[in-house]
Image (tube, grey):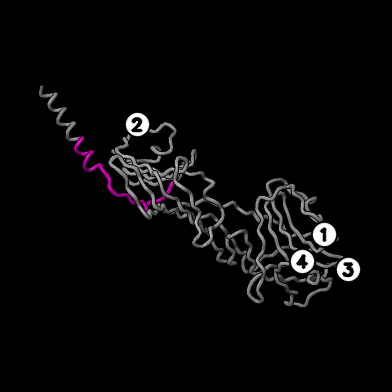
């Protein structure tokens, strides 16, 4: 009888704890680090015995910054889910991402978002080379905010007009820029280019910059990146790139372009400057060294700079 009475008292104590200390009436995860599962589309935040889960397609996090005051908006529904869980014990990553969740800790309470919006504001994450001031996009930061989100609870609903989830960072595709210093030029156009098996950089150059005459010491010919001449384009390809791609009247569709970045029009004495230094290379032969200064490359709302000085390469011409 004593044993039965003891078990009854223990059960009452546990039940009392669940109804009191283990009940959450408000939640906040804004300052908690965001993590992600590698085997599904769940990103999440963990805080001792609490978890906030967001399940939306990975494609929702694009490599394209959003315009000012124009975030990506996703409606919360059966496919785009927001779930809050409160556990009886400390929660770990394995409890979230495993196909078959561990038996412990036990979920004490769960709120499922029934309505609202997921708003995602995307910005670039850049690093700057301190030596030449070139920049590199290393990733994209996605700031996530829930708007007018309604959580369905066991005892009713809870509504937040604005609920900050926080930041989630995705990595950017690396742009190799693995070129040698040898430039080539089309025989029937002003297209100068450099390439390897996966990428190309193409300059439709003002022909006056490639004159077969040596330039004075420290006095290169100069021009500005433009929209009708001195057009600079960088392309990263999905398939093998060969010399057959260049010097065509119509740009080939194969190999397919994975990314294209176009240089921003230059500003005199400020940015987008082309400098060409010409030296003799024996009788009737000349070497033209093309240098790009403070050139900005842009794709959509993304951009980066080639730095204070970037050597495009050397072009050899003959007369």
Q: Are the residues at dot 3 and dot 4 in contact (C-beta closer than 8 Å)?
A: no
| Mark-to-mark CA distance, 4 and 1 | 11 Å
Label 1 Cα crowd, 10 Å radius (few <14 / some 14-19 / many 20+): few
Which mark is on residue 284?
Answer: 3
Q: In what element is the residue under mark 3? A: loop
Give the residue drawn at x 38%, y 37%.
Answer: 95
Q: Is residue 23 magenta?
A: yes
Who comes first in sequence, dot 3 or dot 4?
4
| Mark-to-mark CA distance, 3 and 2 | 81 Å
Q: 212 or 243: nearer the eye?
A: 243
Label 3 Cα crowd, 10 Å radius (few <14 / some 14-19 / many 20+): few
Who comes first in sequence, dot 4 or dot 2?
2
Who comes first in sequence, dot 3 or dot 2?
2
Which mark is on residue 205?
Answer: 4
Q: 307 or 25: nearer the eye?
A: 25
Q: In what element is the residue under mark 1? A: loop
Who comes first in sequence, dot 2 or dot 1?
2
Who comes first in sequence, dot 3 or dot 1?
1
Question: Residue under circle 1?
Answer: 186
Percent across and percent down for residue 208 are 80, 72
| Mark-to-mark CA distance, 4 and 2 | 67 Å
| Mark-to-mark CA distance, 3 and 1 | 19 Å
| Residues drawn in magenta | 14-35
Question: Residue under circle 2?
Answer: 103
Percent across and percent down for residue 144 are 44, 53
Label 2 Cα crowd, 10 Å radius (few <14 / some 14-19 / many 20+): few
In the picture, measured across the screen, residue 255 lies left or right of residue 80, that is: right
State the quadrant of the N terminus: top left
Which of label 3 and label 4 is nearer to you? Answer: 4
């Amino acid at each position: 009888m004593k044993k039965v009475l003891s078990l009854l008292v223990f059960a009452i104590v546990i039940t009392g704890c669940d109804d009191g200390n283990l009940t959450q009436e408000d939640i906040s995860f804004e300052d908690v680090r965001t993590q992600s599962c590698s085997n599904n589309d769940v990103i999440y935040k963990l805080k001792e015995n609490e978890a906030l889960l967001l399940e939306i397609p990975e494609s929702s996090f694009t490599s394209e910054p959003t315009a000012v005051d124009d975030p990506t908006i996703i409606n919360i529904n059966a496919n785009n889910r927001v779930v809050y869980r409160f556990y009886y014990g400390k929660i770990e990553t394995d409890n979230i991402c495993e196909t078959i969740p561990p038996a412990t800790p036990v979920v004490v309470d769960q709120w499922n978002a029934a309505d609202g919006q997921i708003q995602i504001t995307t910005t670039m994450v850049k690093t700057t080379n301190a030596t030449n001031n070139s920049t590199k996009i290393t990733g994209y930061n996605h700031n996530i905010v829930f708007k007018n989100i309604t959580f369905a609870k066991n005892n009713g609903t809870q509504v937040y007009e604005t609920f900050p989830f926080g930041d989630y960072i995705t990595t950017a595709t690396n742009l190799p820029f693995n070129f040698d210093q040898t430039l080539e030029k089309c025989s029937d156009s002003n297209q100068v280019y450099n390439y390897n098996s996966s990428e190309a950089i193409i300059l439709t150059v003002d022909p006056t910059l490639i004159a077969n005459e040596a330039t004075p010491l420290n006095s290169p010919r100069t021009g500005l990146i433009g929209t009708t001449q001195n057009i600079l384009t960088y392309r990263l390809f999905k398939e093998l790139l060969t010399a057959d791609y260049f010097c065509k009247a119509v740009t080939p569709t194969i190999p397919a372009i994975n990314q294209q970045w176009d240089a921003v029009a230059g500003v005199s004495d400020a940015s987008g400057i082309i400098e060409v230094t010409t030296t003799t290379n024996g009788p009737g032969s000349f070497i033209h060294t093309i240098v790009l200064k403070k050139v900005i490359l842009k794709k959509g709302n993304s951009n980066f700079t080639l730095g204070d000085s970037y050597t495009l390469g050397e072009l050899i011409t003959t007369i």
